[in-house]
Image (spheres, rainbow, N blue to C red):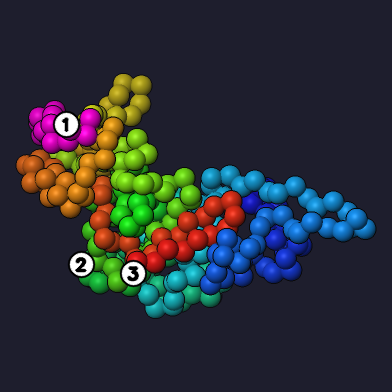
């Protein structure tokens, strides 16, 4: 309801449709657009209170902006997660309306595959389409250099494979995902590992970043705390840092050298555009 109210509010107060607001070359902060109108004269009624958007509504705004980059005939990487699902829904909607045609999607998880099928989005894979025109996905953290942490939803390996094969990678987040350095949120930096001797691998990962106060935890689910299993039948060890881990490429190489590690959730120098939705509007950051 709040999201719909926000759209109606923009139409009433700024006399422009919401899609135009999202598609503007300048952000709300650049143009001075705010969610409440200018102070009225004494002869006008009091303006409505500013609309407070939920985190999910901000994600939806960013996702709709990202889909503006999609063109008919493209091969698209379809991301996974609470933000990317809005983009996938929008692509399906535009296909049904005939505004997009000849789209081929490459899903980054079984969940996204099921969503895309339900929306009628034609699908393929990297074997048939090794070059992807555009990928759209969310992120768990974004640093000032557009490096990312991804994979808290558990799909980091397939995401990295698809998004590493694309010409343009558009990342969509709300402003809560911005950090000064990767790991700075205090939340998990995931590493996908093989199940064999997982405790041994987890211990080696923790020792690797001992100076950063690293704690490595196997990701579990349910009351019985069963290991979370990825689409690739692997486990995930979540790394929690108390300090900056330093040079990210050095850290990446060190993790990948450990036998038993499949992939990690640092996406370095991959994003070409990051779209950030905040209370004052949409900001587009380009590499």
Residue at label 3?
168
Residue 138 pos. (x, y %) = 40, 53
Determine if the magenta segment contains residue 198: yes
Q: Quadrant of the C terminus?
A: bottom left
Residue 258 pos. (x, y %) = 8, 42
Residue 211 pos. (x, y %) = 17, 33
Query: What crowding class fits label 1: few (fewer than 14 Cα within 10 Å), some (14-19), or many (20 or more)?
Result: some
Q: Main secondary structure of the magenta part?
A: helix
Secondary structure found at label 3: strand
- Indicate which disc, 3 or 2, sits on the residue closer to the N terminus: 2
**Label 1 vs label 2: CA separation?**
40 Å
**Label 3 vs label 2: CA separation?**
19 Å
Residues in magenta, as a range: 195-213
Q: Is residue 259 visible?
A: yes
Query: What crowding class fits label 2: few (fewer than 14 Cα within 10 Å), some (14-19), or many (20 or more)?
Result: few
Give left or right: position of 95 versus 2. left
Residue at label 1?
210
Q: Nearer the viewer, residue 55 or 233?
A: 55
Give left or right: position of 55 versus 75. right
Secondary structure found at label 1: helix
Residue 17 vertical placement versus 61 (above, below): below
Q: Nearer the viewer, mark 1 or mark 2?
A: 1
What residue lies at 63% left-to-right and 63% top-to-bottom? 32
What residue lies at 39% left-to-right and 66% top-to-bottom? 286
- Indicate which disc, 1 or 2, sits on the residue closer to the N terminus: 2
Residue 30 vertical placement versus 154 (above, below): below
Q: Nearer the viewer, mark 3 or mark 2?
A: 3
Residue at label 2?
127
**Label 1 vs label 3: CA separation?**
36 Å
Residue 152 pos. (x, y %) = 33, 42
Secondary structure found at label 2: loop
Q: Is residue 89 visible?
A: no
């Amino acid at each position: 309801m709040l999201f719909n109210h926000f759209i109606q509010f923009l139409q009433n107060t700024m006399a422009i449709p919401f899609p135009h607001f999202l598609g503007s070359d300048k952000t709300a902060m650049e143009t001075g657009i705010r969610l409440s109108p200018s102070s009225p004269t004494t002869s006008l009624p009091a303006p409505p209170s500013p609309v407070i958007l939920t985190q999910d509504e901000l994600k939806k705004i960013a996702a709709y902006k990202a889909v503006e980059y999609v063109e008919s005939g493209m091969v698209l990487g379809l991301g996974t997660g609470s933000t990317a699902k809005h983009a996938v829904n929008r692509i399906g909607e535009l296909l049904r309306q005939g505004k997009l045609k000849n789209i081929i999607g490459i899903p980054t998880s079984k969940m996204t595959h099921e969503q895309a099928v339900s929306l009628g989005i034609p699908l393929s894979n990297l074997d048939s389409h090794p070059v992807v025109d555009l990928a759209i996905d969310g992120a768990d953290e974004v640093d000032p250099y557009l490096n990312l942490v991804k994979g808290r939803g558990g799909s980091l390996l397939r995401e990295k494979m698809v998004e590493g094969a694309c010409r343009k990678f558009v990342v969509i987040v709300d402003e809560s995902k911005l950090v000064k350095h990767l790991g700075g949120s205090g939340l998990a930096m995931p590493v996908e590992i093989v199940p064999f001797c997982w405790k041994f691998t987890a211990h080696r990962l923790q020792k690797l970043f001992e100076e950063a106060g690293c704690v490595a935890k196997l990701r579990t689910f349910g009351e019985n705390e069963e290991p979370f299993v990825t689409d690739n039948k692997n486990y995930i060890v979540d790394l929690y840092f108390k300090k900056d881990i330093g040079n990210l490429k050095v850290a990446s190489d060190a993790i990948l050298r450990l036998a038993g590690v499949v992939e990690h959730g640092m996406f370095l120098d991959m994003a070409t555009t990051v779209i950030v939705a905040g209370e004052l509007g949409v900001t587009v950051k380009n590499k």
